[in-house]
Image (cartoon, helix red, strand yellow):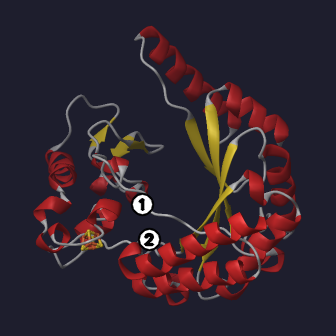
Amino acid sequence: MCPSVIDRLQKQLLELADRHQVDIIPGTIITNGYLLDSDMARHLKDLGIAHAQVTIDGPEAIHDGRRKLRNGKGTFRRIVDNLSDTADIMKINVRINVDRGNVDSAYEVVALLQNEDILPKVDIHFAQVNTSGNTCADIRDRCYGDEEFSHTLVKIYSRLFDEGIYRVEYPRVFTGAAFCGALSEGYFVVSPTGHLFKCWEELSLDPEKSIGDVLATTPGEEQRKKLEEYMAWDPFNMHECRSCGVLPICMGGCPVRGMANQDASKGECLYWKYNLEEMITLHYSCKMREAIDR
Ligand code: SF4
């Protein structure tokens, strides 16, 4: 999305909020970070977009092999420089994508952020690369399964710990809120054609999975059914979830993947189901080492 579109949309949203006297929560942008320099970060912040998620695919050689400009040049160095320039302006979460092809060097990205003094100013998380339907079928062999990924996460964080980098994810308990905004009534993803979707994973020019249309006052029959499917999705109605120890930190996981499951007795298990004890142990070790080093 070019900045002028963001400007136009965000200004109109702010005007609407002002007219109806409602608060508007700070916006988040998901970006490859290439154009997110300090001027852009200040501009976005002035528009009420205070958070950014920046995705990195591995250390320089791997990232640049996967994410290059049209002229073949890499993007990694500029993204890291941008992180350095913007981390004091916006709240930034660096998402490090992990699959079988880059796992051995995933920790190097964090070590680099540490060496460049960026790490203390940003949040990081490692994300499982998934295929999305047939769109990414060519990378299917590279992707981890859910349980395997959860053990991979433990290995990555253990390696960071061994290298003296005391960062590890900690689960959050969902207090009343669902796992995903898609289960809220007023949550929509708008496609360029004006179709409304519940999940960006379903976003496509194919209206089959839409639940409405910005130009129509009432949804079509299929769209209404699709919306009802989302609204009815509830881990408390799934017997395996009801008796699951990690329900408060999972809430049935991703609804769109859960709905695609053949097994209707549970949702889409989050990795905490398989690695909670090890991650909590690591978290405790990190806190202890930080206290000793202080
Ligand atoms: S981990 Fe699996 S069984 Fe447990 S709450 Fe989540 S989806 Fe349900």
Looking at the picture, how far across and down is residue 141, in whole percent?
51, 90
Q: Quadrant of residue 290?
A: bottom right
Q: Residue at x 20, y 53 (%)?
A: 226
Residue 84 vs residue 197, the one in the foreground: 84
**Labels in figure, total:** 2
* Mark sitting on residue 201: 1
Q: Up-down: is 267 above or below 118?
A: below
Q: Residue at x 77, y 46 (%)?
A: 87
Image quadrant occupied by the C terminus? bottom right
Q: Quadrant of residue 212?
A: top left
Looking at the picture, how far across and down is residue 1, in whole percent?
63, 43
Q: Up-down: is 192 above or below 156?
A: above
Q: Residue at x 61, y 28 (%)?
A: 48
| SS at badge 1 | helix
Q: From this viewpoint, is residue 105 visible?
A: yes
Where on the image, by quarter, is ligand 1? bottom left
Q: Quadrant of residue 93?
A: bottom right
Q: From this viewpoint, is residue 75 visible?
A: no
User: How far, Cα to Cα, is label 2 from label 1?
Assistant: 7 Å
Residue 30 vs residue 238, the one in the foreground: 238
* Label 2–label 1 contact, CB within 8 A: yes
Graded by Cα atoms within 10 Å as few (under 14), some (14 to 19) or many (20 or more), the crowding at tag 1 reads: few
Q: Up-down: is 45 above or below 178?
A: above
Looking at the picture, how far across and down is residue 152, in whole percent?
54, 85
Graded by Cα atoms within 10 Å as few (under 14), some (14 to 19) or many (20 or more), the crowding at tag 2 reads: few
Decide if ligand 1 comes within 8 Å of the CB at mark 2: no
| SS at badge 2 | loop
Tag 2 residue: 132
| Residue 170 left/right relative to 121 | left
- Most distant residue in the front direction: 292
| Residue 98 left/right relative to 107 | left
Which residue type carries mark 1?
Answer: Glu
